[in-house]
C-alpha cells in the first residue's frame, strides 16, 4: 500500500480509543472537585440532576482532552510518554477526534443547561474554551508559565458544581477556584522535576527545561506560599467551619514543609528525587483532603 | 484490503455499534429521569 492510499483510507478506530481520547484518569480529580463544589453548595438539588451535572463536568473534561489531543497530535508523536495515544499511534484519524471533541463539548454544555441552569452551562463552556484555546493553542507552546494559566481550566469544576445547585457564584467557590489554581504549579513542577520528559524535543517550553531546576524549585516554593493563602482564605473569611479550618491548617503546613525541602535541595539525579516524588504524591492527597473537609463542614454546619 | 483486515474492521464496527447503542439507551433513561425530576420540582414555580 502506498502512502497516498493509506492516508485516503479512513481508519475505523476502536471505541476504546475514543474512550482513551477523553483521558479518564485525569477525570477523577475533576469529577471529585466538581462533586465537592456541588455538595458544599447551600440548597438542595434532585439526585438525578446532581448526577447529570457531574456527568456533564466529566463529559466536558473529556471533550477538552479530545480537542487537546486533536491539536497536539504532532507534538505527542515526538514524546515517548504520549506517542502511543490514539492519534500519534495512527489508530484514529484527526477528523474523528475533532468531531468527537466538538460534539461532546456541545452535548455536555447543552445537557448541563437543560438539566441544571445556564450559568453552570456557561462556566462549563468557558472552561472547555479556556483549556483548548488559551492553554493548548495559545500559551502552552509559548511560555514556561503555561501550566500556571492552564491550571485555571482545572480549577473550574468546583465552581460549576456549585453553580449547578445555587445558580450563582459566591466567595466560597471562588476561594476553591483559587486553591486549585495556585496548587497546580507546585503539583505539576514537582512531577516535572523527577520525570525525565522529552518536552524539549517536542518544542514545548516547560519550566525545568527552559529556566533550569533551581528556578523551578524556587517557583514551587513561591506558588506554595500563595496557595497557602488561598487555602486559609475560607477560614479567615468564615466561609467554612472548624473541620476545614483544622484540615487546611495542618495539611497546608505539611505541604509547606515538603515544598520547602524541595526548594532547598540541589539534585538533578533522577534516581534521587524522593522529596520531589513525596511532594507530588502528597499534593494529590492534599487536594482530596481539603475538598473533602469543605463538604464535611457543610454537613456539620447544616 | 485483505479478508483478514476486513474482518478486523467489521468486528470494530460491530463493537462500536454496540457501545453506541448502549450509550443511547443510557441517555434515553437519563433524559426520562431528568424529565421526571424537573416535573417533580415544578410545583414550586
Image (cartoon, rainbow, N blue to C red):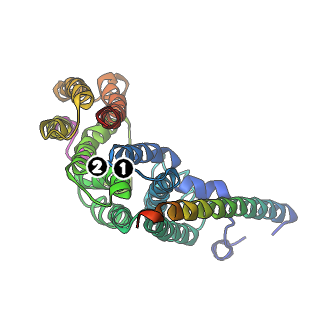
- Percent from the top left, x then y, of residue B36? 57, 62
Q: Which residue is mark 2?
A: A206
Residue A223 location, quadrant: top left
Check chain identity for marks 2 and 1: say if they share one.
Answer: yes
First in sequence: mark 2 vs mark 1: 1
**Element marked by disc 1:** helix
Query: Subunit of mark 2?
Result: A
Which one is in front, A273 or A230? A230
Cα–Cα span, label 2 and label 1: 7 Å
- Percent from the top left, x then y, of residue A233? 15, 40
Q: Which residue is drawn at the image coordinates 37% and 52% (left, top)? A: A161
Location of the N terminus of chain A by quadrant is: bottom right
Q: Are marks 2 and 1 in contact (CB under 8 Å)?
A: yes
Is residue A227 something that shows in the picture?
no
Is residue A61 something that shows in the picture?
yes
Magenta span contains residue A196? no
**Element marked by disc 2:** loop
Q: Is residue A179 left or right of residue A19?
A: left
Q: Which residue is mark 1?
A: A199
Does residue A195 sit above or below A210 in this rendering?
above
Looking at the rendering, the stretch of residues picked out in magenta corresponds to A206-217
Amino acid at each position: 500500500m502506498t502512502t497516498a492510499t493509506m492516508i485516503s483510507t479512513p481508519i475505523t478506530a476502536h471505541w476504546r480509543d475514543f474512550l482513551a481520547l477523553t483521558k479518564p484518569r485525569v477525570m477523577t480529580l475533576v469529577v471529585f472537585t466538581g462533586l465537592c463544589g456541588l455538595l458544599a453548595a447551600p440548597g438542595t438539588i434532585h439526585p438525578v440532576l446532581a448526577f447529570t451535572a457531574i456527568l456533564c463536568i466529566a463529559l466536558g473534561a473529556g471533550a477538552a482532552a479530545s480537542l487537546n489531543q486533536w491539536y497536539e497530535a504532532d507534538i505527542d508523536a515526538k514524546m515517548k510518554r504520549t506517542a502511543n495515544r490514539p492519534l500519534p499511534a495512527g489508530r484514529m484519524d484527526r477528523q474523528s477526534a475533532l468531531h468527537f471533541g466538538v460534539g461532546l463539548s456541545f452535548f455536555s454544555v447543552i445537557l448541563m443547561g437543560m438539566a441544571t441552569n445556564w450559568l453552570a452551562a456557561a462556566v462549563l463552556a468557558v472552561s472547555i474554551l479556556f483549556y483548548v484555546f488559551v492553554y493548548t493553542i495559545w500559551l502552552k507552546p509559548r511560555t514556561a508559565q503555561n501550566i500556571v494559566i492552564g491550571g485555571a481550566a482545572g480549577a473550574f469544576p468546583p465552581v460549576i458544581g456549585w453553580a449547578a445547585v445555587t445558580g450563582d457564584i459566591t466567595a466560597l467557590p471562588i476561594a476553591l477556584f483559587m486553591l486549585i489554581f495556585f496548587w497546580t504549579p507546585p503539583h505539576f513542577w514537582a512531577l516535572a522535576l523527577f520525570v525525565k520528559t522529552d518536552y524539549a524535543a517536542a518544542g514545548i517550553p516547560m519550566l525545568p527545561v527552559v529556566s533550569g531546576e533551581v528556578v523551578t524549585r524556587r517557583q514551587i516554593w513561591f506558588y506554595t506560599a500563595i496557595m497557602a493563602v488561598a487555602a486559609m482564605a475560607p477560614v479567615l473569611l468564615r466561609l467554612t467551619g472548624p473541620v476545614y479550618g483544622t484540615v487546611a491548617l495542618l495539611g497546608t503546613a505539611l505541604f509547606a514543609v515538603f515544598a520547602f525541602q524541595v526548594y532547598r535541595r540541589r539534585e538533578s539525579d533522577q534516581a534521587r528525587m524522593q522529596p520531589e516524588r513525596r511532594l507530588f504524591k502528597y499534593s494529590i492527597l492534599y487536594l482530596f483532603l481539603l475538598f473533602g473537609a469543605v463538604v464535611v463542614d457543610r454537613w456539620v454546619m447544616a | 484490503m485483505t479478508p483478514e483486515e476486513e474482518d478486523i474492521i467489521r468486528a470494530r464496527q460491530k463493537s462500536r455499534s454496540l457501545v453506541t447503542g448502549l450509550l443511547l439507551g443510557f441517555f434515553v433513561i437519563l433524559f426520562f429521569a431528568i424529565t421526571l425530576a424537573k416535573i417533580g420540582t415544578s410545583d414550586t414555580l
